[in-house]
Amino acid sequence: MTVPNLLHAVPVELVQIDTASTLWDEDAREAVQQASRSTPITLQGQVKWGAVEEVEMERQGVAEGADGYVLFRKIDLDALGIVLAPNDRFTKIGHIETDVYILKLQPMGHYPDQGGHTLVRAWFEDRTPAKVAHG
């Protein structure tokens, strides 16, 4: 059974949206006021700060940029019963206090004996870059 390893993994604190206790506007498909969040969960992840500096164009226009990503092993997420989703938040990456949100997820590391991906890359962005310094 092929299970990849993470390089230089650090603790990453994850806070997910708690959809059960959040009041939702069905027409707008968004949280009313502020979304409720779960208690923080600490995972091991391989972090890369900084994204491509050049502007990427897509058919719809300029592509959304990311400030970096955290790579997780799917086996670790499954063991804790965690399903990552866009808009989940990383509040601490290593020793750095952060307030970054998952922008998109990218399944990676596909192996035939695993029946699919073994890694998940969670691209994140800082929604208030002027308020927080990232050390």
Image (spheres, rainbow, N blue to C red):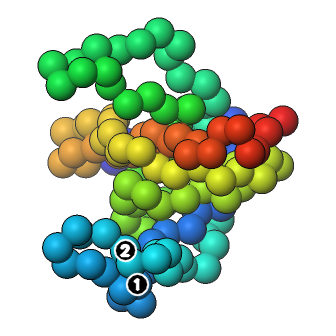
User: Residue, x 53% and y 13% (percent of image)?
Assistant: 53
What mark, if any, has residue 22 been given in the picture? 1
Q: Position of residue 27 (x, y in %)?
A: 17, 73
Q: Residues within 10 Å of mark 1 (few under 14, many from 20)?
A: some
Picture quadrant where residue 106 is located? top left
Q: Residues within 10 Å of mark 2 (few under 14, many from 20)?
A: some
Single out the residue that lies furthest toward the top. 54
* Tag 1–tag 2 contact (CB < 8 Å): yes
Q: Position of residue 105 (x, y in %)?
A: 35, 45
Q: What's the amino acid at mark 2? A: Ala
Residue nearer the viewer, 132 or 8: 132
Left or right position of 48 against 98? left
> Which secondary structure lies at badge 1?
loop
Compared to 63, does 2 lie above or below? Answer: below
Left or right position of 119 against 12? left
Q: Position of residue 68 (x, y in %)?
A: 55, 32
User: Residue, x 59% and y 43% (percent of image)?
Assistant: 126
**Cα–Cα gap, marks 1 and 2:** 7 Å
Single out the residue that lies furthest toward the bottom. 21
Give the residue pinned by disc 2: 31
